[in-house]
Image (tube, coloured by chain):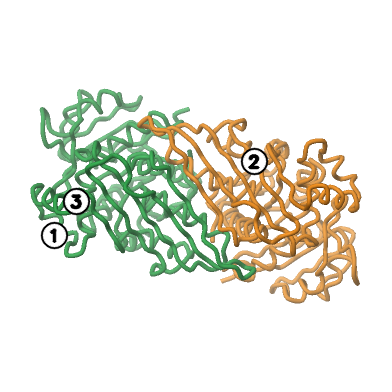
Chain colours: A green, B orange
Amino acid sequence: MHDIRFAVLGTGGIGRRALDVSREKPGLLPVAACDRNGIAIDHDGLDVDELLAATEGNVASDGGAAVKQHGAGAGVVASAQARSTETPIEDIIAESDAIDAVLIALPNLEHDFIPRVAERFTGAGYEGVLVDVLKRSRVIGMLDGRADSFEESGITFVCGAGATPGFLTGAAALAAQSFVEIESVEIHWGVGLKSGYEDNRGTVREDIAHLPGYDIETARELTDEEIEGIVDEHDGVIEFEEMEHADDVLLERAGICDADDVSVGGILDVRSDEKPTTTTVSVTGRTFDGEHATNTFELGDETSMAANVNGPALGYLKAGVQRNRAGEYGVFGPADLMPEF
Amino acid sequence: MHDIRFAVLGTGGIGRRALDVSREKPGLLPVAACDRNGIAIDHDGLDVDELLAATEGNVASDGGAAVKQHGAGAGVVASAQARSTETPIEDIIAESDAIDAVLIALPNLEHDFIPRVAERFTGAGYEGVLVDVLKRSRVIGMLDGRADSFEESGITFVCGAGATPGFLTGAAALAAQSFVEIESVEIHWGVGLKSGYEDNRGTVREDIAHLPGYDIETARELTDEEIEGIVDEHDGVIEFEEMEHADDVLLERAGICDADDVSVGGILDVRSDEKPTTTTVSVTGRTFDGEHATNTFELGDETSMAANVNGPALGYLKAGVQRNRAGEYGVFGPADLMPEF
């Protein structure tokens, strides 16, 4: 039944939600969770209820730390199942014979952060699946550049496996099947993040880096107060255009279209849980019989960002494990894998 | 560039369109096409232009024969590249070291027809990919029952890989990713088949078998005149409800929902090329955070049935070849594979 044992790196918003969702996903057993100060590990399965309750309020806001910022305790060690460690990744790798997959749920505020995390796994000879939910286009090339080392180690790296890129990239890849030539892919998302705001400060900070006048470096330097100021300036509703989301290179990499033909934008409302716009993928192309048309994929407005990130992340993780067990190593994008339910 | 060499069994509407589409699909080289009276084979690649022109008017209407019914010549032997044979499948298998995949584009008017075709490949020790575009739910179980023999032979069998089941099954599997529990999957298709009618008589006959009062056996016995009579009774627009399409068992098989939660219906208009309704997949479910929502996938109305069958069929074929080369054998449905572009 639980034939996939997985670990989560990071117990901020995404890591904690992944543990939460996994309770309702058949075949998944969470056996480890860590942040940079601690690790909880139980090969019979973590007590997710306890871990979520103990780490409530974890945020991943400044400087890449997925550590509890307020309340008692600090990070995952607030859980009775956890212990302190200065070497969480090495501790995970030490147990890796009993870990099939690792979900990297760390903020990616430095471009090479996830590639460097991956290097620590290859350096230690990890054999298994790594999954990330990164956003930035330029990171994919860094991972592809490490494909040989993944193959040597026996790692199946599934990259860009959240909502966008991830879920919506897969939808675009599927929608492309009517066509022999893709003319454009437009991804437009809506996120209402009122009640989830505290839990997703890292995501909001990363989104701000896509606004005109900001980049990853300047966004990382912003204080929480400065971020609140930006949110206030926009009355809580921030619109994004031409974001650097890796859907573009992931679709190009799969031979579906040029990266330039892909555009990603969206609207974030941090003062409402209602989506300010319906999340839509529109794929326009030419059919073999000379017609032009647009296929569309729409997410129901009641689906939260957390549902659309973590369901697919775990679905792609399961698909990655199947590939890994078949001996297929290297870097896989969402367009290469049908996520499993 | 052309790293997948494939054959087509059947040169009726679907077989011929698959050859047509493959000309614009990177990495695919059609090397053989056959029907029950002949075979065309060229390992450097068939001359698809010549073959399509020579076989124009092929229909696959009565009794499972994919043989030209009118005009000069009879079936694929009308092509200058073809020769007569009484053993087309054996002839394909004899060349199978140089054939990576076989698309079975034969009408499936008998339930066990495709399973029996597959048995001939396993019996002859074929190693490679078989792809079908079957529709009926009950055939999937027959194929699963033969999984061991596929594995022994080294066959990766991709079943139900047309439009529905196939493309739309994959869309439902992907749309399910927002949810932890699926409540319903509704597939509703529209097909305008005026100019494609002559080329798709077999499909129309198979659809009529889904009407109340008909089944596969009675539909097979209908004369072309009787079919025209049924079409006339409906003024050319036939509506179908609760069709036995294998989307249901293919989604259940992938652990996504119960077959009973899946419904397939549609509207066929044989007197217009405009679709009488937009083809839509609606997946309703419960998210991990307790919301209920519906994700939808819609095909642009300008996409023809031929585009939506043959693009995905070849996309799933390519994905099947990748699995086969990795040593993964057995039966795969659309929810198990992301089709490649």
User: Considering only vertical position in the picture, is A258 above or below B270?
Assistant: below
2 vs 1, front mark: 2
Q: Which subunit holds the residue at mark 3?
A: A
Q: Which subunit holds the residue at mark 2?
A: B
**Do callouts 3 and 2 mark residues in contact (Cβ within 8 Å)?**
no
Question: Gap in Å between the C-alphas at discs 3 and 2?
Answer: 44 Å
Q: Specify the quadrant that holds the C terminus of chain B.
A: bottom right
Question: Which mark, residue A205?
Answer: 3
Question: Gap in Å between the C-alphas at discs 2 and 1?
Answer: 52 Å
The kind of residue tagged 2 is Val
Q: Is residue A132 left or right of residue B31?
A: left
The kind of residue tagged 1 is Thr
SS label for mark 2: strand
Residue drawn at 9 percent across, 52 percent down: A226
Is label 1 on the same chain as label 3? yes
Q: Classify residue A27 by image quadrant.
A: top left
Q: Specify the quadrant that holds the N terminus of chain B.
A: bottom right
The kind of residue tagged 3 is Arg
Q: Residues within 10 Å of mark 1 (few under 14, many from 20)?
A: few
Question: Which mark, residue B264?
Answer: 2
User: Considering only vertical position in the picture, is A215 above or below B212?
Assistant: below
N-terminal of the two: label 1 or label 3? 3
Q: Which residue is mark 1?
A: A218
